[in-house]
């Protein structure tokens, strides 16, 4: 923990008014953004594939983009849409 605090506060004057911003930016610099981006692309691609398989491609994209691998479970649990099923009729007009 001391090593992380040393990296976060490196070059920061704790008495400066914008010390929080500099510490926050130092912590963000430690995050492996490229790796996280490519993992997210993989999660969305697999979610789209599962959604296509279940007949809900857009839902697969949305759930996997929002929740990652947990979104895959959401797609797999949802029932498949019925082929040729029509939506419920509109209520009668006045």
Image (tube, helix red, strand yellow):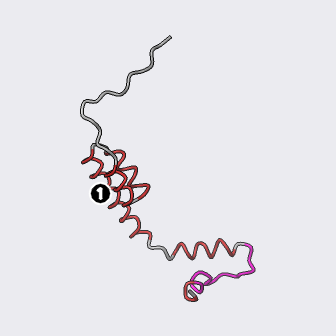
Residue 20 position, x and y percent, is 67, 73
Q: Is residue 33 toward the left or the right of residue 48 in the image?
A: right
What is the number of callouts on the image? 1
Residue 45 position, x and y percent, is 31, 56
Decide: is 48 above or below 41.
Answer: above
> Which residue, as the protein is rendered here, is positioned at the far top?
94
Magenta region's main secondary structure? Answer: loop
Decide: is 51 above or below 13.
Answer: above
Number of other residues with Cα within 10 Å of mark 1, as a class: few under 14, some 14 to 19, many 20 or more: some
Q: Residue at x 31, y 27 (%)?
A: 86
User: Does the magenta segment cover residue 10?
Assistant: yes
Decide: is 83 above or below 34.
Answer: above
Quadrant occupied by the N terminus: bottom right
Circle 1 — which element?
helix
Front residue (pair 55, 37) = 55
Front residue (pair 15, 49) = 49
Picture quadrant of residue 36: bottom left
Residue 72 position, x and y percent, is 34, 56
Q: Residue at x 40, y 55 (%)?
A: 65
Q: Is residue 27 toward the left or the right of residue 57 in the image?
A: right
Front residue (pair 63, 23) = 63
Picture quadrant of residue 82: top left
Q: Residue at x 42, y 21 (%)?
A: 90
User: Does the magenta segment cover residue 25?
Assistant: no
Decide: is 85 above or below 42.
Answer: above
**Chain part drawn in magenta:** 5-17
Q: What residue is shown with label 1?
A: 46
């Amino acid at each position: 923990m001391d090593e992380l605090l040393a990296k976060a506060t490196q070059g920061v004057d704790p008495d400066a008014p914008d010390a929080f911003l500099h510490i926050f930016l130092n912590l963000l610099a430690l995050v492996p953004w490229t790796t996280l981006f490519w993992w997210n692309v993989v999660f969305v691609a697999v979610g789209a594939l599962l959604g296509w398989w279940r007949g809900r491609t857009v839902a697969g994209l949305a759930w996997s983009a929002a929740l990652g691998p947990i979104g895959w479970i959401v797609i797999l649990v949802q029932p498949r849409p019925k082929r040729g099923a029509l939506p419920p009729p509109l209520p009668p007009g006045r």
